[in-house]
Structures are given as C-alpha cells and as structure tokens.
Amino acid sequence: MTSPPGTTFVTGASTGFGAAIARRFAADGRRVVVSARRTGLLAGLVKEFAPSVLALELDVRDREAVAQAVSTLPAGFADIDILVNNAGLAKGLEPAQRADLDDWEQMIDTNCKGLVYCTRAILPGMVALGRGHVINIGSVAGSYPYPGGNAYGATKAFVHQFSLNLRSDVHGSGVRITCIEPGLSGGTEFSLVRFEGDQRRASAVYAGVEALSPDDIAEAVHWATALPAHVNVNTIELMPVAQSFAPFQVSRETG
C-alpha cells in the first residue's frame, strides 16, 4: 500500500520515531516537511530525499512560530494532508511529591500544547481540501499508570482524548484522525532525555529486551494512512511481545 499524493508534516523529526516516519513517507515519493528544534539533525533526510523533503526549524511550544511556519510554507509543500504530531518527551521518574515542576511544565507544553498548536494551524487546510489525516503519537502510558509516570501519563491521556474529540469535530469533512500508542520503544532518545543524559540509566531500560523500533512505529503510522479513504483507524496500541501488564501494587506496611 502507498499513501495518497500530497505533503506530510512531521514534528520532532530529528531522531527516533519522527525521523523514521519521515523517511517512510519520503520513500513513497511524498513531499515531507520535517520540523525540529535541532535542524542540523535533519540534514541527512534532506540530502537523501531532496528535493521532496523540506527542513524546518520549529519549537512546537512556540504558538506564534507554529502559525508563522505553517502559513509561510512554499507552494510545493503548502497543501498538507497528513500531519504527524510526533514531538514529545518525558522528563524525570520521581513520584509526584518529589517531581520537578519545571519537568511537568515542559511535558505539558510540548506533549499537549505543542500538539494543539500544530493541529489548529494545519487542520483547517485539510478541512478545506476535503481530505487529510492527523496522526497523534500517544503512549500506553496514557492508559496504564506506572510509578513516576504522573504528568507524562497524563499528557498522553490528553493526546488520546483530544484525538477522539477531533474525530467528532471533523465528522463529515473527509478528514481522518488516528492516535498511535506505543509501549516500550528503543532506538530513540526518549530515556536519555528522561534521565537528563545519563546513558547508564537510559540503557538499563532496554537491557535484555527486544523493544519496538522507530521503524515499527513508522510502519503503523503509514499503514493507517494508506488504508482506503473511507476507513478511519481510531487508535493503534502496540507493545513489544516482551512487555505486558504489571500486577496492582499492594502496600503491606503496618503501623
């Protein structure tokens, strides 16, 4: 299956999921706008797929910058019919009573507000075209709590519910909405960012486990968009076989 012709806009495309998703769509011959704060990391994609890939320096937390970037895209990239809201992060793993409020604020600003800004800037164009697909990258953390997941899990629950409400709002417009919710995933900077660059702690998360890869996520995103236009995949939840659900916690302490 191949995706329909048009432009795909991918946020957080410098590494990990975003880079793999951008490469998957570019390999289909689609035009792709790859956005990230670290544009130097986008050079490989641009070189590999030029002239069909456009690199864009963008911090999704900056509402005005998002609106400006979308409204000034060159003509060949302006008709966006696939938006992949991939930019996101986790910071810290402390329990709520010891968590850093700056970490919470950064997750909310990126995972929630940044996703909202990009969606609001691009969605009207899709509705005007009478077609399009918004793919939001959520997480199983939005459904299943774990110690230290506090604000991160809450932001991904927001992504899930926002996606469902978008579906209701665009009813009858021809625009599709999908939330992709991965479990344990390697090959990204996710844990390195969460643990403030501590490579030892980051590597320990994946020790002895075959986690999902960025290519696995890219394939799920591509599959959802490549289905016939009358088919909407609401949610895709995927985990590696090595991961499943933990038992409930029970405190045995007394006194």
Image: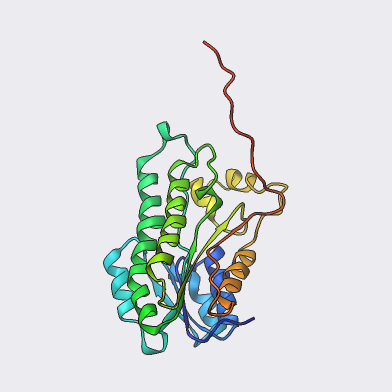
Vertical placement of residue 248 versus 130, above or below: above
Residue located farthest toward the top when viewing the structure as drawn? 255
Q: Would residue 128 be found to the left or right of residue 238 on screen?
A: left
- Which of the 4 image quarters holds residue 161? bottom left
Give the residue at x 50% y 57%. Answer: 138
Q: Would residue 35 be found to the left or right of residue 3 on screen?
A: left
Task: Tell me if residue 33 can be seen.
Answer: no
- Pick the residue in front: 125 or 232: 232
- Which of the 4 image quarters holds residue 38? bottom left
- Residue 65 in percent (x, y) is at 30, 69
Looking at the picture, the colour scheme in use is rainbow
Give the residue at x 56% y 51%. Answer: 140
Residue located farthest toward the left when viewing the structure as drawn? 64
- Pick the residue in front: 45 or 210: 210
Vertical placement of residue 142 versus 65, above or below: above
Q: Quadrant of the N terminus?
A: bottom right
